[in-house]
Amino acid sequence: MKSILFNAFADKGHPQRLDLALDLARAFDGHLSVLNAVPYEAAGTIDPYGAAFAAMVPIWREEAAKLKADTEKDLANEGVAWDWIDCAGPVSLSLIRHSTLADLILIGEKEPRSGGKSPSFTAGEVALGADCPVLVLPDECKRLDFDKTAVVAWDGSSESSHALRAAVPLLAKMKAVYLVTVGEGKKTDKDFDLPAVRGADYLSRHGIGCEIVQVAADDKGVAHAIQSAADTRDAGLIVMGCYGRLRLAERLFGGVTRAMLTDVKVPLLLKH
């Protein structure tokens, strides 16, 4: 993971996320690209939306300038190669546009510009649209602890296979790896389902040993079962494929991805 794309946003979790991004860049001897996206209105001179938006433009510009100055100061003596990217427009679109040559995207658990009060819908959008995996970081997370274990949510689907493959560089550094399958009662055959042992075989070819664990879904759903398995095994990383069902169905009825993003307890690696 030599090219790391980091979403910079001035909330309480930014300093911790930046420290973690720097740690990852050092661990992989990589390059850190720090992206800050501001609304279109702040980048232009014409405000088509009225006085309320016009009043916010100088505030957004001031926030962006301060964040850039503070971040540049923090990065000055870190010994990590980095660059700063200014963007105008939605965060998700900006990250996807600049992710074509990225190996990993880092983003916080809360939705940018929501006051830190709602789960990151942006993280799901980026995971769906970007070619590289997305690492969603809890606000209080200060580091990715390689002395802890990793839990991989595995059902043999193409999404979970893509996530497993994308996570290999991180899994190789973790203390132990668990492939966790969640039983949901009667299971229908899927064309692309692979037995859990196939995932273990794949990891073994990369020199990564793992333990296969099967847990039962409880009344609180698959996401809760995955999180419980991670808690039990002192996980410092959860890996999962995202949006295995139709996107419209996910929006209307929810899903495991949405549930996981609602309560991010440890770093969560997503890949569609």
Image (cartoon, rainbow, N blue to C red):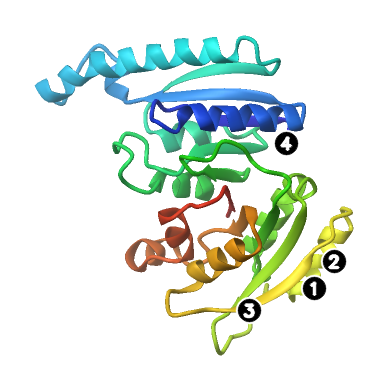
Q: Residues within 10 Å of mark 3 (few under 14, many from 20)?
A: few
Q: What residue type is labelled 1?
A: Val
Is the C terminus in the top left, top right, bottom left or bottom right quadrant? Answer: bottom right
How many angstroms separate mark 3 from mark 4 (CA)?
32 Å
Is 227 positioned to the left or the right of 162 in the image?
Answer: left
Q: Position of residue 142 (x, y in %)?
A: 56, 36
How many angstroms separate mark 1 from mark 2 (CA)?
6 Å
Label 2 SS: helix
Q: Assess whether mark 2 and mark 1 are in contact (beta carbons under 8 angstroms).
A: yes
Residue at the limit of the structure toward the bottom, as seen here: 186
Which residue corresponds to mark 2?
A: 201
Label placed on residue 197: 1
Nearest to viewer (mark 2 / mark 3): 2
Label placed on residue 109: none
Q: Position of residue 47 (x, y in %)?
A: 19, 19
- Up-down: is 12 above or below 130? above
> Looking at the image, is mark 3 or mark 1 earlier in the sequence?
3
Q: Which amino acid does label 4 sit on?
A: Met
Is 192 positioned to the left or the right of 211 in the image?
Answer: left
Q: Position of residue 95 (x, y in %)?
A: 50, 33
Label 4 SS: loop
Is 20 positioned to the left or the right of 37 in the image?
Answer: right
Q: Which amino acid does label 3 sit on?
A: Lys
Q: How crowded is mark 2: few (under 14 residues within 10 Å), some or many (20 or more)?
A: some
Is the N terminus in the top left, top right, bottom left or bottom right quadrant? Answer: top right
Residue 125 is at least partly visible in this image: yes
Q: What residue type is labelled 2?
A: Asp
How many angstroms separate mark 2 from mark 3 (CA)?
20 Å
Is 138 positioned to the left or the right of 202 in the image?
Answer: left
Label placed on residue 1: 4
Which residue corresponds to mark 3?
A: 190
